[in-house]
Amino acid sequence: MTTHDVTFPLQGDGSTEQAAQPFDILGKTYEDTYGHLPEQLTAIEWLLARLPAGAKVMDIGCGTGRPTAERIAAAGHRVTGCDISRTMVELARTQVPAARFELADVRALPENPAQWDAITAFFPLLQMPRADLDATLRRIASWLAPGGMFVFSTVPFDIEEQEIQWMGQTIRATSYPAEAYGRLLREAGLTVVHEQLSVFHPDFPGMGAEEHLFLYARKAGGPAIAPHALAGPYPHPETYRGPHELSEQGWLGLEARFERHDITPVVETLTANTRVLDVGGGSGAVVREIAARLGSCTTVEPHAARVESMRELAAAGVTVLPGRAEQLPLPDDSVDVVVATWILHYTDDPVAAATEMARVVDLAHPEAKIVIVQGAPDNELISLWNRICAPLTGEAPDHQGYLLTRAARVLAERGFEDISLTRARVDVVFPEEDAESRARAAAEALADFWHTGHPRLARLREALLPALRVHFSTGTDRVNDDAVMLIARPRAPRTTS
């Protein structure tokens, strides 16, 4: 589809002409006053970093074409702008010949579902009744292709069709308080991935400060996360089995036996990062290594006893915050990487946890990423638990690949579309003298690790023994606890010559 095969109409009730008049009068003066908003330029860069090559983009309320249409078209995308002001459209056509511009009222645009890779709307919806505003946001959501992005800004205040003075013009303004817009976009079926309030001081006689609201949102769907051998076995379960219990006693009883080769590759991915958040600090093994390499690390830990036990790491540069993965105690865009090793299967809601990870990472950072470690599909510990312990405790089997895939989908929908999976070796070592001693030690350590305090703990140990005897009869002194490391990054920005 070319950028010249869409025809846009005008609204026919006279309201369009009334709303257009101030902009017909202002013309280039509007661009001079509002064309260099830092938050708008940041929003455009955020979008450019995520658009597929040759994306189809609609710019609603395009104004003079600068800066939005000009920058997006210069990056090689197909831009169609619309505006109610004839003066603005004529200026845009002159200034940005690489894009297409039409005189049109967004309310009169035809239904064209799932056709646009992205839609931008910087301050265009301030002169229509709330009923029209609500309907327009719903229609914009329907026009986006699966995975499409919507970048929107407005002036938030609680008025409807009230006459105000702006840039020497009288306009009838409508808006909502800031908190309403995120709700409206979510109700329209979009996921809000960024929300920011800022204050702007227009360089125009008689004008005071304005509060601006910027939101980035994404439509669900887009490229599916392709099946991957390290996220198997397939088919996946349809729902999450719920969290495993984990006691500090059970963990400490097994930790000394771990031979971990998953920490080093995690730390090596962080060499260009400075603001690192670890989720679920646990014993401190991972955060200690991160702080040693980078000088500092913040970790969020849900268990009070472990929060206190990790306080001693402050001298090593580790900041410990109490909190849960599903509700991280950090503001939006406050770190450039999140690390979460072996925690999703202990969360009440792994989707909420992945959503929170995406929320706190600054997507604009050149090394933005999320690193998640979970079990491999051939992990022997998980296989033992699924075959022997789950039937005895009446629990659903564990499936680490399901958790990785769900997290990958959530992260991709929030802009982390470059996703890789790699294996990391982890063993639990039982150096006891003979196979029987190893089997008994393993049965006790593993049962305690999984089910400390369970009323059938002795039965679980006994049930594990036959399989562990067979396992250690081969001469091995270890059980495979292999991991999969998922790294999710934003898609690399397009480069232009």
Image: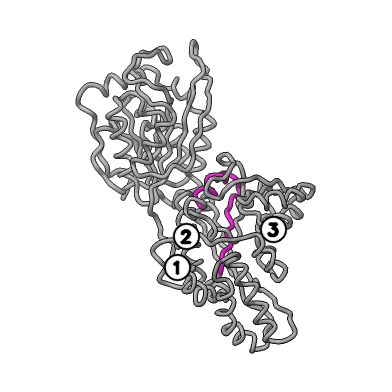
Do labels 3 and 1 touch, CB within 8 Å? no
Magenta stretch? Answer: 354-375
Quarter location, residue 162: top left
Image position of 317 (left or right of 109) = right
Do labels 1 and 2 touch, CB within 8 Å? yes
Say which residue appears at 64% left-offset and 52% top-offset. 278
Residue 164: percent from left, percent from top: 38, 14
Q: Secondary structure at mark 2?
A: loop
Q: CA distance from mark 2 to mark 3?
A: 23 Å
Image position of 68 (left or right of 80) = right
The residue to which callout 3 is attached is 283
* Dot 3 amino acid type: Ser
Which of these two is toward me, 443 or 224?
443
* Dot 2 amino acid type: Gly
Q: Reply above or below: 218 against 94.
A: below
State yes or no: residue 362 in magenta. Answer: yes
Residue 343: percent from left, percent from top: 57, 58
The residue to which callout 2 is attached is 242
Return the mark for residue 206.
Answer: none
The residue to which callout 1 is attached is 396
